[in-house]
Amino acid sequence: MKFENISVLETAKAVPSKVVTNDDLATMMDTSDEWITQRTGIKQRHVVDEETTTSLSTDVASQLLTKSGLSADEIDYIIVATMSPDFLSPSVAATVQGKIGATKAVAFDLSAACSGFSYGLSVARQMLIGDEPKRAIVIGAEVLSKLLDWHDRSTAVLFGDGAAGALVESVEGDGAVLGTDLRTLGDLGKYLTAGQVGENTPFQSESTEFSRFFTMNGRRVYNFAVNNVPLSIESALADANLTVNDVDHFVLHQANIRIIERIADKMGLPESKFHSNIAEYGNTAAASEPILLDEKIEDGTITRGDIVVLSGFGGGLTIGTVVLKY
Ligand code: B82
């Protein structure tokens, strides 16, 4: 096998232009900027008015092609990690494939909530290794505003919309993915749910509790994150034959600033290595890691050769950690 790893050629992001501040939300429900900022670190979020999960994803894919100078027919796979697709079928990825004219690409969506981008990179790597050079577009895209109960102040303030992704290519020799650790704790899935689809048969028995909106047991998922994410990071670093001291940047899922602070503290690491943009975007699930990764590459914080730990955690419950050499 000649091509045993992948490298990250380009990253890109697309976020809705409309911004909703905490003060805006305070006019709609019983909450305040102070309460939201204190508990979560969020100051504002981007929310669609005309964009869709598909349009944001198509924007990201087009930018990746422009930035790389590649043509659409040079793409072999398109993976869109999302928990807020526009349709259950066709997938967002298939529609993006059609829109950008990537006629040779196999395209599918990946459902792993906030871990979706890490899962997607791991899947892409497995699919790209082989005898021939191949390329994939991996996108995390969410319009979580459509899964929000805009009257529920405990969840409506937490989430935002956006998309970002990476164009990856198989390489000979040294590659970007140095180690991975993917975990699924399905027993805990009930503590973080969204988008229940429901039944529709004339033979239905008694209807049970139903919610198409977010439900979250904050304490349970918080404990899950602070207890398991450090273990996943350590395991991915062991897979890469590295230690935490080799890591230049931690790009964690932006669920809550308190979670990131607690994880840094538990791992005995300075918070300065843990990047955050939750103040601007809120929690964008599968899009949160790639939006932050792209921003830190664009502003020159992350440069070629840096060791980056990407770690997503969320619905499933799932965790996905990827150690990247950018
Ligand atoms: S919380 O439990 O209400 N809390 C503890 C940080 C606030 C002081 C809370 C809030 Br508010 C927001 C998010 C979480 C949380 O734990 N989120 C997650 C945990 C694991 C996996 C995913 C998430 C997520 O929100 O995406 C807790």
Image (spheres, rainbow, N blue to C red):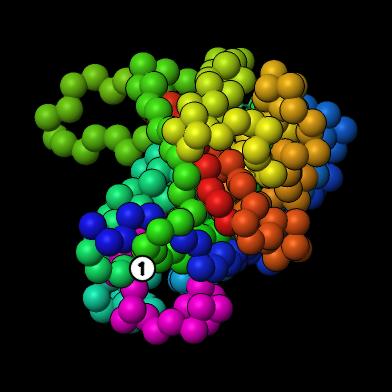
On the image, numbered disc 1 is attached to which residue? 135
Q: Amino acid at mark 1?
A: Arg
How many labels, in total?
1
Q: Quadrant of the N terminus?
A: bottom left
Give the x, y percent position of residue 45.
70, 50
Residue at 53 percent across and 48 percent down: it is 324
Q: Give the residue displayed 40% in from the left and 28% down from the top.
A: 183
Rendered location of residue 284, percent (x, y) = 59, 46
Quadrant of the frame with the C terminus? bottom right
Q: Position of residue 156 (x, y in %)?
A: 64, 38
Q: Residues within 10 Å of mark 1 (few under 14, many from 20)?
A: many
Q: Is residue 217 magenta?
A: no
Front-lying residue, 57 or 129: 129
Q: Quadrant of ligand 1?
A: top right
66 is higher (above) or lower (below) than 227? below
Disc 1 CB within 8 Å of nearest ligand 1 atom:
no
Q: Which residues are magenta?
A: 63-87
